[in-house]
């Protein structure tokens, strides 16, 4: 029982780390980073509510785009937003 308490205390203090958090696995996760977002695309509709989007590439440690679906960047590759929304009297109209 006392050994378990000591191990938990060391884990909480950050002195001991679980096996899955080895330095190798942490460095592997940091290999890929996101590039800057592209500019927003033109709205899909010139009149009324449409959609605009932007993308970013996942980059390897040499700052080259990673094309594999297994790229290790966290978060979305694409963002979308509503555009050309017409608002009158706090109501949205298409």
Image (tube, grey):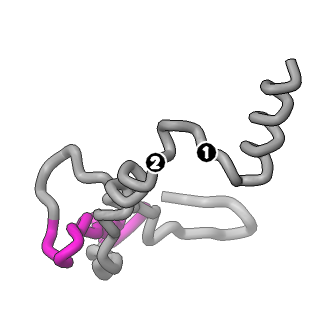
87 displayed left or right of 94: right
What residue occupies the far top of the structure in this picture? Answer: 1
Q: Quadrant of the N terminus?
A: top right
Question: Viewer-proximal residue, 50 or 67?
Answer: 67
* Percent of width and height locating residue 41: 27, 74
**Does 56 sit above or below residue 39?**
above
Question: Viewer-proximal residue, 7 or 67?
Answer: 7
* Percent of width and height locating residue 32: 29, 64
Cα separation, mark 1 vs mark 2, equals: 8 Å
Q: Residue at x 25, y 64 (%)?
A: 58
Q: Residue at x 66, y 69 (%)?
A: 88
* Percent of width and height locating residue 18: 58, 38
Q: Secondary structure at mark 2?
A: loop
Among the 4 quarters of the image, the one containing residue 8: top right
Residue 89 visible (yes or no) = yes
**Does 25 sit above or below residue 54?**
above
**Does 7 sit above or below residue 63?**
above
Q: Residue at x 15, y 69 (%)?
A: 65
93 displayed left or right of 33: right
Residue 45 visible (yes or no) = no
Q: Earlier in the sequence, mark 1 or mark 2?
A: 1
Magenta span includes 58: yes
Q: Residue at x 62, y 69 (%)?
A: 87
Q: Do the CB atoms of the residues marked 1 and 2 lie less than 8 Å apart?
A: yes
Q: Label 1, on which residue?
A: 17
- Magenta stretch bounds: 43-65
Q: Secondary structure at mark 1?
A: loop
Q: Label 2, on which residue?
A: 22
Magenta span includes 93: no
Q: Residues within 10 Å of mark 2 (few under 14, many from 20)?
A: few
Q: Residues within 10 Å of mark 1 (few under 14, many from 20)?
A: some
Residue 56: mark in rendering: none
């Amino acid at each position: 029982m006392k050994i378990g308490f000591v191990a938990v205390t060391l884990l909480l203090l950050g002195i001991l780390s679980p096996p899955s958090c080895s330095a190798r696995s942490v460095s592997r996760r940091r290999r890929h980073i996101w590039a800057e977002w592209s500019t927003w695309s033109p709205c899909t509709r010139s009149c009324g509510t449409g959609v605009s989007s932007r993308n970013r590439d996942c980059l390897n440690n040499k700052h080259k785009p990673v094309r594999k679906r297994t790229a290790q960047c966290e978060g979305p590759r694409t963002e979308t937003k509503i555009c050309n929304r017409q608002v009158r009297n706090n109501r949205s109209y298409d």
